[in-house]
Amino acid sequence: MPDPILRLSEVSLSFKGIKAINALSFAVARGEICALIGPNGAGKSSLLNILNGVYRADSGTVAFEGESFARIRPLAAAQRGIGRTFQHGALFGKLSVLDNVLAGLTRHSRTTLAEHAFGIFRDHAQTRDFRARAEETLGFLDLSSHRNSIVATLPYGLQKRVDLARALVGRPKLLLLDEPMAGMNRDEKRAMSRFIAQARQNLGITIVLIEHDIGVVMDLSDHVVVLDYGRKVGDGPPDAVRNDPAVIAAYLGTRH
């Protein structure tokens, strides 16, 4: 694979002796959308937690932009260009959409989130730059009309889009999306798929996403990795993975 931005080599992770990830190896090409699929408990979210430093792998290495590490801290991951959304979200429900998106820049800032909330700014030039970046991101995701809305009052689909905006505003090189379309209806999934595709195309971001909707995966991704109880059982283009007997047995069920 030419110029992979991400490469995992024999990565394993256990919880109380139970293997969550078992000697997992694969690579993600720069600029592609890679989908992680598999049954619940297959190790997908645990893998994202390793990639952005929430967990430390028991063994194996991760290489990001050619630099290998056994563990990276979340702050260092963000500063090096790894962004992340979470399956159940972590938005500040009582704050506005704009403030939530600005919160995505705190790891790149000399001003803390608390200082921002109380209007205490140490670097006014940086503050202006961050606000411009936040407004640009809101426009990119068609959220400008909701900039002053309190997040908790928004429909679920819009809240998920705010979560994406908060991850994008830091201008990551690699964006990890943990079930960005969970709980959405068909129209909301179509809109979110469009925004994810545009983020890759217009912003040059490489994306690794977890998604259970196989139709979405096949339409959106360039590359699919299939996990089953922490083991890799499929790795390749969507059409090849969809027709792989091992994938059908593990993910769809042999009688499906």
Image (spheres, rainbow, N blue to C red):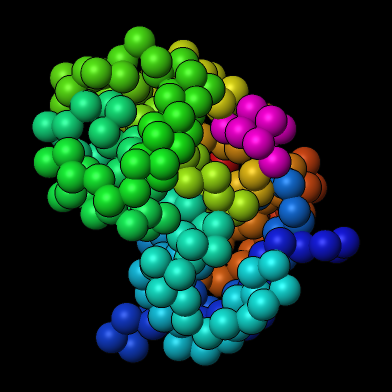
Q: Nearer the viewer, residue 139 or 225?
A: 139
Looking at the rendering, in which quadrant would you find the C terminus? Answer: top right
Residue drawn at 47 percent across, 33 percent down: 133
Residue drawn at 35 percent across, 36 percent down: 101
Where does the magenta region start and end? 196-204
Q: Nearer the viewer, residue 154 or 26?
A: 154
Provide residue 109's location: percent of width, then percent of height. Answer: 37, 54
Q: Please indicate, yes or no, whether residue 43 appears anywhere in the rendered image.
A: no
Residue drawn at 30 percent across, 44 percent down: 103
Q: Is residue 216 left or right of residue 241?
A: left
Check residue 201 for magenta coloring. Answer: yes
Task: Identify whether 137 is placed above or below 143.
Answer: below
Total labels: the figure holds 0
Provide residue 240's location: percent of width, then percent of height. Answer: 79, 47
Looking at the rendering, in which quadrant would you find the N terminus? Answer: bottom right
Magenta stretch: dominant secondary structure: helix
Q: Is residue 53 left or right of residue 12?
A: left
Task: Identify whether 60 is placed above or below 43.
Answer: below
Check residue 118 for magenta coloring. Answer: no
Q: Nearer the viewer, residue 32 or 165?
A: 165
Residue 15 lies in what quarter of the image?
Answer: bottom left
Task: Identify whether 27 is placed above or below 239.
Answer: below
Q: Please indicate, yes or no, whether residue 153 appears anywhere in the rendered image.
A: yes
